[in-house]
Image: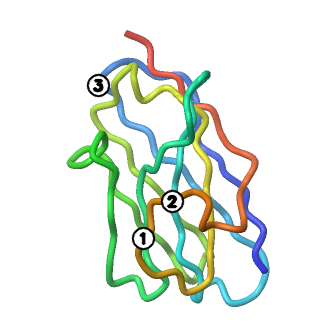
Amino acid sequence: QVQLVESGGGLVQTGDSLRLSCAASGRSFSMYTMAWFRQAPGKEREFVAVIVSSGTKTEYGDSVKGRFTISRDLAKKAVYVQMNSLKPEDTAVYYCAAAPFLNSPLNLASRYGTWGQGTQVTVSS
């Protein structure tokens, strides 16, 4: 099983960019489908992006398509989300999640068994 630690959050302005990182420890990182979710105060956890264990497929939530890009570095055991053109509605705690060899559907938080502690992203208007 992997353990996950997110970093890279902060306070930015509308239109800025930010890259979040998720560092994994443990064995067999390459077998995990890795995803990002976010949760704003008073709202349900929302799917942001996912990259499957083979690295051959990515998916994005409708609200971030065209602005966010997920990637991973197997050698560093890390997954990233590059967030461009940030908006105030992107303000949330962002969580990294992992599940071994997960197949579709990939956008359901309940299907991921391992989570990081989250990192806060605040976008000011």
Q: Amino acid at mark 1?
A: Pro
Q: Residues within 10 Å of mark 2 (few under 14, many from 20)?
A: few
Secondary structure found at label 3: loop
Q: Is disc 1 placed on a helix, strand or loop?
A: loop
Residue 34: x, y in percent? 54, 69
Q: CA distance from mark 2 to mark 1?
A: 7 Å
Disc 3 residue type (three-letter): Gly
- Give the quadrant of the C terminus: top left
Dot 1 or dot 3: first in sequence order is 3
Q: Residue furthest top?
A: 125
Judging by the rendered image, the residue that carries numbered circle 1 is 105
Q: Classify 34 as above or below 13.
A: below
Please report contact status of discs 2 and 1: CB closer than 8 Å, yes or no.
Answer: yes
Question: Which residue type carries mark 2?
Answer: Leu
Q: Which residue is tagged 3?
A: 15
Q: Position of residue 26 (x, y in %)?
A: 79, 80
Where's residue 25, x and y in %? 76, 74
User: What residue do we see at 33% from left, 19% from top?
Assistant: 14
Disc 2 or 3, which lies upstream in sequence? 3
Q: Residue at x 54, y 82 (%)?
A: 74
Q: Residues within 10 Å of mark 3 (few under 14, many from 20)?
A: some
User: Which residue is most to the left?
Assistant: 66
Q: Secondary structure at mark 2?
A: loop
Tag shown at residue 108: 2
